[in-house]
Amino acid sequence: MTHAAHSEYDSYRPPEPPRRRRRRGGGLGSRSGRPGRPGQAGGGDGSREMPMVEDVEFSSYYGRPVVKAPPWEWPIGLYLFVGGLAGGSALLGAGGSLTGRAGLRRTARLTAVGAVGVGLPALVMDLGRPERFLNMLRVFKPTSPMSMGTWLLSAFGTAAGVAAAGEMDRMTGERLPLGRLRPLLRVAEGAGGAGAAVLGAPLAAYTAVLLGDTAVPTWAASRKGLAYVFVSSAGMAAGGAAMITTPTAEAGPARTLAVLGVAGDLIGMRFTKEQMHPLEAEPLETGGAGWKLRLSEGLAIAGGLGTLLGGRHRGIATLSGLALASASALTRFGVLEAGLESVKDPRRVIEPQRERLEKRRAAGITDDSITTGPRPAAPEQPGSDSESQVPGSAAPME
């Protein structure tokens, strides 16, 4: 006797009830009076049919995830962090140049190009092959956050690299073999530093747009406030890094940016959660992601207070800067982990959508591509024949 091949989905089938022995001839004319098998005289009663999916309130295929999680791992979290660090540092470098703070300008420019030097390999590592990054430069697509981010990162890296080259030439006593190109570098480094500063804020924010453009529940629901969180976190990281590497006498703008970043990060995260459905915000408050974000909040507060109260003391400034940079990194990794966790529960996809759909219907929005349902019937006009009108329309049939 041959047996049917088993499938990997057989483990999801509920246990089949034991079969009962049937009497032969169970048709209408049998003495038992029980109906027979399908195709026999009495037809079947379907008593052996069994449900394959449990009766649940939300629609899910065997309780499996509705949305497939992107295959992003720790390199993407590192890229999110150093991208913000690079953007904020470029802004500080421009501020140091404008205010005559050569030490702040130098350390900020070098931090920016160093962060890009770490972030680009991390991005390529996650993509798997370097040519995938190069292939994205073949198309300029403004409607694609990934395409715009690739071009933005390339332009920023070029500008920051030119500015950092000028700094390294001065640090070596103009010993780099530039020859007649040195005057050209002096002109280009100013333009490069300014260009990197202009692109710094978009570089820090576009990753939030990239996450919000996905179907991952927590990321998609946070798109109204996540960009503010990431920009503030970038300022916090850049200010903290400059406080570590810059003499305290020149680190005044870095301390200001760090304090503003802490305030924006705390307020922005609270605002973001308030705009989300409780199920969508749950991964940001529980599990490993919730632990990272709570630790980030504590470090941000401690680093901000240290910056305000003792930022001019070298030891306190260094410790505060480390706390702020760590808080920024934990924010990026926490948001990344929360999104990957949110796709595991189908309720986080279906129930918030269902509630938003019901709210739109309650508000009378029933005629767009999102909300479906019968349109409310128009009141009958006095003296008109109700049978001669189209349902839901006030115009009579012709």
Image (tube, rainbow, N blue to C red):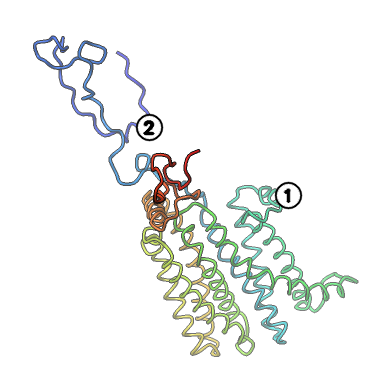
Residue at the image point whose x is 57% and y is 75% from the top: 235
| N-term-proximal mark, 2 vs 1 | 2
Residue at the image point whose x is 34% and y is 46% from the top: 58
Q: Tag 1: residue type?
A: Arg
User: Do callouts 2 and 1 mark residues in contact (Cβ within 8 Å)?
Assistant: no
Residue 209, compared with residue 39, is above or below; it is: below
Q: Relative to the observer, which residue lies in front, 308 or 266?
A: 266
Q: Position of residue 114 (x, y in %)?
A: 65, 68
Q: Which residue is at the far front?
A: 383
Residue at which label 2 appears: 8
Q: Nearer the viewer, mark 2 or mark 1?
A: 1
| Image quarter (top left, top right, bottom left or bottom right) of the N terminus | top left
**Local crowd at mark 1 within 10 Å, few (<14), some, or many (≥20)?**
few
Residue 393, compared with residue 281, is above or below; it is: above
Q: Relative to the observer, which residue lies in front, 42 or 331?
A: 42
**Local crowd at mark 2 within 10 Å, few (<14), some, or many (≥20)?**
few
Q: Secondary structure at mark 1?
A: loop
Residue at which label 1 appears: 138
Q: Which residue is at the far left?
A: 31
Q: Tag 2: residue type?
A: Glu
Q: In screen coordinates, is 316 left or right of 386?
A: right
Q: Secondary structure at mark 2?
A: helix
Residue at the image point whose x is 37% and y is 52% from the top: 351
